[in-house]
Amino acid sequence: MSYATHVQRVQKGLSLIELVHTSHPRWPLPPQPSQPPYSTFHISVLDSSFNPPTLAHLALANTLPQPPAEAPPSTSSASRDFDARLLLLSVRNADKQLKPGDATYEQRIEMMVLLAHDLARSRARSVPAAPEHFPESPSHEPNVAVAIIDEPTFVGKSAILRDFLTRRISDLLGLAEAALPPSPKLTFLMGTDTIVRLFAPRYYADEETMVAALRRFLSPEGDDARIICARRVSRGASRAEEEKVESEMSEVARRIIPVQRLAFVDIGERECTFSSSEVRESLAKGDERWKDMVTPSIAQYITSRQLYSSSQ
């Protein structure tokens, strides 16, 4: 099935979510059957517009799970990782509509697949999580997928993803309907610009609706989702302003639910300054420095298709 067909299926409501690429047929399970199967699968979800994917996306996607605040310090030096990773594109973003000069959804999917290959080849980074909370995967083979969805909110995406993943895991394991499949636990990866929107009442009917939705999203009795937010250095914003956002968002999250569900991480001094909009602007100006902000495979793709250039 072509990427265009996948997009049409989602946009026409024929499918809530389309899995367009997996690093192996058993995703999100390990490439090889493991015994016994996990009771829980920890899956990271990087949901972005990928217009285009940058090294900041790659660094954030490479982030490792963060241990709960109440977890004892790990005595193991072995890196712990997510069981699987997902790169997710929404064809209906709450803020960003397709504009003239943008890459099409099909082109973004092609770049996401390239990023998935880059991600599979790269080594996960960040502080290792406590082993009792995130067991080490028995396989170090790549476990990355790309999907598209027609849902603008994280709360809505979480519900769709959990249902889809539960059914997929059950089907892959061949479980009977009465059997309880392993539970998918989702960690959403985002930057500070995105987390501000997540906790902004204007994206909900009202503040009461926002609080109820986010409690369901983050609560252990609900979706039990977690959030890892990359510290970014945005153009025109000082480090102090970014730190203020981190402090304010952490406080908002604590007011909604006392259990720790939000962690901030560093993704690299260079990577934290990169943005898709800066890549597009550099290309439009003919500034070759944009190539330093993306992986070589994506740079080659952009060049070969003359994306974002002033002559497009």
Image: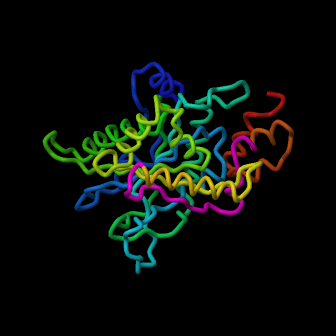
Measuring 73% from the left and 34% from the top, which residue is drawn there? Answer: 305
What's the image's color scheme?
A: rainbow
Q: Which residue is at the front of the view, 229 or 250?
A: 250
**Magenta run includes residue 257:** yes
* Quarter occupied by residue 99: top right
Measuring 65% from the left and 62% from the top, which residue is drawn there? Answer: 268
Q: In this view, does 217 lie to the left or right of 245?
A: left
| Residue 310 in picture, x, y percent from top left | 83, 31
Q: Which residue is at the front of the view, 61 or 219?
A: 219
| Residue 36 in picture, x, y percent from top left | 22, 61
Q: In this view, does 101 lie above or below 255?
A: above
Q: In this view, does 195 lie to the left or right of 156?
A: right
Q: Which residue is at the front of the view, 215 or 147?
A: 215
* Quarter occupied by residue 60: bottom right
User: Which residue is most to the bottom?
Assistant: 75
**Magenta run includes residue 168:** no
Q: Give, as a single range, the part of the protein colored magenta.
A: 256-278
Measuring 34% from the left and 65% from the top, which residue is drawn there? Answer: 133
Q: Can residue 76 be seen in this view?
A: yes
- Label count reads 0
The C terminus sits in image quarter? top right
